[in-house]
Image (spheres, coloured by chain):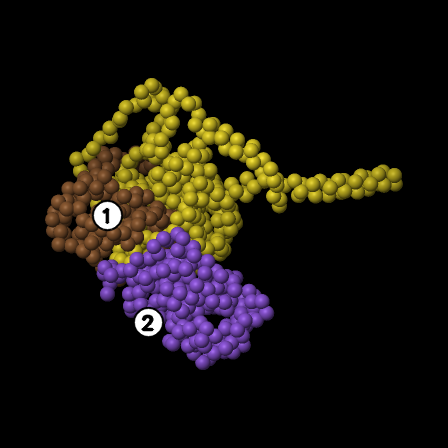
Chain colours: A brown, B purple, C yellow
Amino acid sequence: MSHASKHEHPNPARARWMGIFARASAADLQKALDGLDAVPAYEFLRRPETGLVMVRGRSGGTGNPFNFGEMSVTRCAIRLAEGVTGHSYAAGRDMKKAELAAVFDALMQTDRRMTLETGVVAALARKQAEARALKSRKAAATKVEFFTMVRGDNPL
Amino acid sequence: MTPSASNDLLPGFADPVFDAQSAFRATLDAMSYPGRVQTVPTSLATPEPLGIAAGSLALALFDFDTPVWLEPVLAEGPAAGYLRFHCGCPVVSGMGEARFALVNAASLPRLDNFGIGEDRYPDRSATLVIAVPSLTDGPGTRWTGPGIDGSIGVQIAGLPDDFWAQWADNRELYPQGIDVIFTCGKSLVGLPRTINVEA
Amino acid sequence: MYVAVKGGEKAILNSHKLIAETRRGNSERPEITIEQIADQLGLSVDRVMAEGSLYDRGLAALAVKQAQGDLVEAIFLLRAYRTTLPRFAMSEPIDTAKMLVQRRVSAAYKDIPGGQVLGPTYDYTHRLLDFALAAEGGVGMPEAPVADEALDDGMPHVADLLDYEDLIEPDLPDPDQPEAFDLTREPMSCPAERDQRLQNLARGDEGFVLALAYSTQRGYGGNHPFAGEIRMGEVAVEIVPEELGFAIDIGDMVVTECHMINQFEGSADRPPQFTRGYGLTYGHNERKAMAMALVDRALRAREFGEVAKYPAQDEEFVLYHADNVEAAGFVSHLKLPHYVDFQAELSLIRQLRAEYEDRQQKDAAQ
């Protein structure tokens, strides 16, 4: 079955911010929304709903795709009073987060984009990068050098 | 137009659960009692030229696992984005891949373009949802088969001249073969593959 | 065959109440929370997610709580729940080379680009019960050391190092490969291709897959395996929603991946080379990933012209018995009333016995 392909309508800027909103917590998104000078009016095109994504892997990490298993995901779509549509898909079952992520996706397509980019998006991205770096540094503290011991029966 | 430029997207069912159930019920009745006109009780704003019955049926039945073929006028218009958004269904370019097809009687492709299922899985066939100008005003035909007490007279309008000859060929493929649902406005008539039609 | 019976409604309701009370345990102690299970019994949660084939820590933790820690029952609960959810998308294949690595070791090479990273592992513990964990007040909040530098971004797979020398079979996507088989949409069918086998093994019972893997090591289908690489960490999950038409990340998932490298002496049309076995599981689940990789390689016997004569190489045997929801269901159904069946068997045995005794008497009389 041919579903939408990855490269049908590339939109790297929007994909990036949607990914950042998807990884943010509902609390952080709510705080960011409350911080706006005017909370935007919007209606639901699709109320938050939870479903599944079939996650695929590749044999050997590089070969043919196979169906690895499913993951819960929650999506939402809203339309701002001014007509702009916002979408969200976020792993997990947090409906509030899906709603807020869709609102921010819509706002990022309005003339508020520059302000939001340097404020909200940059702060969320920084927080996510810091969390990743901390995890990686804890793993790095367990890096090991193995030395091969010469076996007694090995000729020197 | 990219699918994301959906700022004029029409909303789906007002009450997703009950509206989908009643559209499902109407479709079920149409397939259970071939030839009888059923009506979807839902009111739905569908993008032109998608009719209310066809749109309701789509919203009730189409999902991520049902590849759909749309006739060009639908595929190139707002209906494609509408169905992608509300149903999440893949819109396919090959008729043979489709499990459902939304078509119009006036530009109906030949039936043998569509999937008839497999010996082991005859259910993996296509269902054609054909928009017609009238369900009651066309040339008279007499239908017999399961779900019909004796026979029933049906007057579908606007079909190609050789449609019923094609249908006879499809009937021969049983248990494989396509199924048809005729739609007009809020009404629909089911024509399962088991039905014999005398034109 | 079993037949329906009536009755017992009150007894069943009371049984539900009794199991609820039993599950709650001693009421003088606080009730365990879902968050505590997700955090502190994380590896149980990982296993339930893997075999329940649904990545959702909260739901898996709930299932563990509801099943009183019976993981196979919890897996069943999760599988049942997933059937209530609609599917929104297929992900793009996850890219494990871009993993945020938490652990990564190779038993084939000691010096690998990016380094060997032990991560959180029980491998080098002494398996002595730690009574500090049982002490009142617990262990407080231990803090792990933090290195100055993060690990390298993106670590190459060890198997790819052998690829440079052309000493390992290539594993590249086949552009003509049809859509991957999906066990959640189609019934199992044999002969199975590798995509179907990998999906089956990924959600297969850990104990069953482990025992099969062990059997290959003990001579029932020798593969001469090396753990080329084991890695665990977070990978991004990316989908292309139908209505957007471009790829977006929806979040991350923790996976464990294992590449087994196996000696292969060559065949008429293949040179001597190393071959691959692949294991991939949700969460931190190394035993399962390694076992899966061994069984994956064993099941590739046909592909390499090897004679499949051992259980782990027998695709039908492995694939049809790996799923513990199916297995538990079929074994458990024997608990259902078989009263009519058994009565029929009973009268048959009585009749056969009477005939047997008649014959014995006649033989004795002669």
In what quadrant of the picture does the N terminus of chain C appear?
top right
Residue C25: percent from left, percent from top = 44, 25
Q: Which mark is residue C77?
A: none
In whole angstroms, how far apart are the C-alphas of marks 1 and 2?
A: 34 Å
Residue B193: percent from left, percent from top = 51, 68
In what quadrant of the picture does the C terminus of chain C appear?
top right
Regarding residue C242, the answer to whether it shows in the image is no
Q: Is residue B156 above or below residue C100?
A: below
The disc labelled 2 sits on which kind of residue?
Answer: Pro
The residue positioned farthest toward the bottom in the image shown: B161
Residue C195: percent from left, percent from top = 41, 54
In the drawing, does residue A62 fall left or right of residue A100? right
Q: How many marks?
A: 2
Residue visible at 41% across and 33% down in the picture = C65
Considering the numbered disc 2 on the image, is that residue within a helix, a strand or a loop?
A: helix
Q: Which residue is mark 2?
A: B72
Q: Which residue is mark 1?
A: A101
The residue positioned farthest toward the top in the image shown: C136
Considering the numbered disc 1 on the image, is that residue within a helix, a strand or a loop?
A: helix
The 10 Å Cα crowd at callout 2, few under 14, some 14 to 19, many 20 or more, is few
Regarding residue C362, the answer to whether it shows in the image is yes
Residue visible at 59% across and 40% down in the picture = C336
- To which quarter of the image does residue A147 belong? top left
In the drawing, does residue B125 fall left or right of residue A143? right
Chain name for mark 1: A
Task: Determine if marks 1 and 2 fall on one subunit.
Answer: no
Residue visible at 26% across and 26% down in the picture = C141
Residue visible at 45% across and 44% down in the picture = C80
